[in-house]
Amino acid sequence: MPVDDGERRSRRVIHRCFGGPEVLEILHRSIPHPGPGEVLVRVAAAGVNPVDWKIFSGEPMFEAYERKLPSGTGYDFSGTVIACGTDVDATSWLGARVFGGRRFHAQADHLVIEPQHLARVPDGLSMIVAGALNVVGRTAMASVRSQHIESGDTVLVSGAAGGVGILSAQLAARAGARVIGTASARNHDLLRGLGIEPIAYGTDLVHRLRATAPKIDVVLDTVGHGTVDAALALGVARERINTIADYPARAAHGVQGIGGAEAGIPELTDIAGRIARREIVLPLDSVHPLEGVRDAYARSIEGHASGKIVVVPDASLLE
């Protein structure tokens, strides 16, 4: 799996062709240098998201991303700023614990980024959780905010045990809503412990939802699989249905499609603080060393993760 390419100072996960996890390899390179207005981050942890493997698999619907080969992988990361380029206030940034996202660069020992795209890791938040937070945190914040959820609402969250789903469900519950979450049976105890009413996937979902809640006000769909159709059958208003997974339903039914692009560093800082204060939690499904990146993506592709999957370049975090 390792690839020799110059000095072995810094590793980076890359792929030279499209396919499954088997196309991923580790490139050894010189440590990159920050340019003007950039900082160098020593990566501690990097999250795994379904969009990552959909991109490196070559799915046509993700052609909008600039997929030049060879390409790096990953988006979410946490780490420590270890060098600053010119035009950066080193006294403010050098040594800072940070997290954020940089597409195609996160799963590596080092990356360079402009500091305005970084959030500070708050006290009480682990670097592993921070490294998993960028996509799911921003997406959950934007999705929940789009529906103006308040006390008395009944909210259905599909995929409530996944990264976006579990944060969205907790945020909705914190707003005072009754929250019902679809999930596999093995995740029902997890959801109950967070104050979320679990309901199994499968046939006759509309009937079972009607029996559980006579009226559902808001639907936050994170997985697709007919959730929008079920919401419409239950009489949920189109403007109160938000899906981040069912692209055809957005076009066909005019439902909302608010995702992470609608949230920035302030929202990311907000949700990180909530997790640090233990108001909500982001469970971890599994943590893998950088050399185990193929296993991490295989786990994601299986589709049964409970919480976030994380790759950890910093071996000290695995001790």
Image (spheres, grey):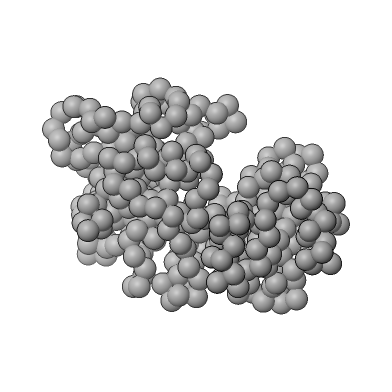
Quarter residue 92 falls in: bottom left
Residue 269 at x, y percent in the picture: 45, 65
Residue at 60% over, 54% down: 184
User: Does residue 143 appear left or right of residue 71 in this picture?
Assistant: right
Q: Which image quadrant is residue 130 in?
A: bottom left
Q: Residue at x 67, y 45 (%)?
A: 224
In front of the other: 277 or 187: 187
Between 9 and 33, the one lying in front of the other is 9
> Above or below — where is 62 with respect to 284?
above
Q: Residue furthest left?
A: 7
Q: Quadrant of the C terminus?
A: bottom left
In this rendering, is residue 150 above or below 316? Answer: below
Of the pair 168 and 251, the residue shown nearer to us: 168
**Would you place residue 141 above or below residue 298 in this image?**
below
How many numbered markers are drawn? 0
Q: Is residue 141 visible?
A: no
Q: Tell me, yes or no, if residue 97 can be seen here.
A: yes
Left or right: residue 72 compared with residue 65 = left
Horizontal arrangement in the rendering, residue 172 relative to residue 57 (left or right): right
Q: Position of residue 108 (x, y in %)?
A: 29, 42
Q: Residue at x 50, y 59 (%)?
A: 137
Residue pushed farthest front? 186
Where does the N terminus fall, quadrant-wise?
top left
Position of residue 296 measured from the top left corner of the image (x, y, whole percent) = 39, 43
Nearest the camera: 184 or 148? 184
Q: Position of residue 249 (x, y in %)?
A: 74, 42
Q: Residue at x 44, y 24 (%)?
A: 18
Is 149 left or right of 60, judged from the image as shown?
A: right
